[in-house]
Amino acid sequence: MPVEIMVQKFGGTSVQDDAARHKALEHVRYAVEKGYKVVVVVSAIGRKGAPYATDSLLELVDSGKSKLSPRELDMLVSVGEVISTAVFTELLKENGLKAVAMTGADAGFRTDNEYQNAKVIDVKTEGILKTFTSNEVVVVAGFQGLSRQGHVATLGRGGSDTSAALLGAALSAERVDIFTDVSGMMTGDPRIVKKARFLKSVSYEEVANMAHEGAKVVHPRAVEIAQQAHVPLRIRSTWDSVDELGTLISDRDLSIQDYRSVTGIAHQVGLTQFSISTAKYSADMLFKLLAKNDLSVDFINILPEKVVFNLNHIQSAAAKKILAKEHIAADVISDCAKVSIVGAGIMGTPGITAKIVTALAKYGIKILQTTDSYTTIWVLVSQKDLGVAVNALHDTFLLGA
């Protein structure tokens, strides 16, 4: 008889203190009582400021100026998840659950040698499956694996989400539950969007696009892994009751004829817009120069007479120096925000761009740049207009939808 497996991932706030860990314990116990073998993936305890959080560990060596190699930095930051794994396993055992703790390497994660941002090559699940023959729960340190060189390697930001999704795929889990401090996906950031609404179900594509455009509930890489394996994800709150299932992320229901045009509004802040004439410096030359200096551009428009692109706050400072050194003139607008209108039904729906322009014009908001894909329309505005812009677009597309 095949083993039914559930993967549960608990983020830093879900294991940050005894109260949070006891709430997480309730969810694990409930799944065990339902007959599942449970793989629990944990992040480091707490967020920046907490002693074992990833950012706090990096501050111990002033990571921006540290003389440690990327491999040595991974030795340091991987400790946070290992501590969290041991602490949570202790709690499970104290409360009568048969649990075993594993590092990422123990759990079978094999990576390349790109320390600090390693890619997982393989997940060898034999160790977990063998452990399940006499145990109910395996607690795995997220965010890490074993490199080809035989050293600990971390998976980059959002790595614990990625660990959970990869285990869900490798173990053919019934689903992966991502526990966080919100009850699920919303149609907009509730801290800014006054009338944001809860989404009961969304497609992989919609969530991945929302995540790429600034929604921070789940890492887009994890969503893409789950989609490839057709493993359902749920975004849930650790603090909700055990039968509150949050937002289901799965394949789009193709039987729905009139799928919603817009799923949600996402945003990113701290962008700087660069406009550069191509009269003396071609787009090809410009992007080669930026790539040579490890600058990753976003939100690009290539026009016959100019190139327009955006960089985040840190990279924009570097770009200004590089352009000045090469005597390349640029019109620069700082403090911009990108607002993204995301929806699987955008393609082929007429009038969406007209609605965007009308909604923003009503409040005198200047559109600095725009582009689109089959699931997303992006608009660049001044950051001071962000609050009004996202609420105007949310009300236009999502109220009453």
Image (tube, grey):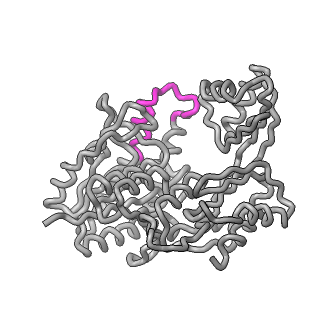
Query: Would residue 18 be visible to someone looking at this image?
Result: no
Q: Position of residue 296 (x, y in %)?
A: 61, 36
Q: Position of residue 297 (x, y in %)?
A: 64, 38
User: Which residues are drawn in magenta?
Assistant: 61-80
Which residue, as the protein is rendered here, is positioned at the far right? 364
Q: Is residue 223 inside the magenta stretch?
A: no
Q: Position of residue 271 (x, y in %)?
A: 71, 45
Rendered view: 290 above or below 247? above
- Image quarter for residue 385? bottom right
Rendered view: 309 above or below 198? above
Left or right side of 199 for 271: right
Q: Nearer the viewer, residue 301 or 243?
A: 301
Q: Nearer the viewer, residue 12 or 93?
A: 12
Q: Is residue 68 inside the magenta stretch?
A: yes
Q: What residue is drawn where x is 51% and y is 60%?
A: 207
Left or right side of 97 for 176: right
Query: Would residue 185 be visible to someone looking at this image?
Result: yes
Q: What residue is drawn where x is 79% and y is 49%?
A: 368
Q: Position of residue 82 (x, y in %)?
A: 35, 47
Please identify the quadrant where the N terminus is shown: bottom left
Q: What residue is drawn where x is 72% and y is 33%?
A: 317
Which residue, as the protein is rendered here, is positioned at the far top? 326
Left or right side of 253 for 132: left
Q: What residue is drawn where x is 67% and y is 76%?
A: 399
Please identify the quadrant where the C terminus is shown: bottom right
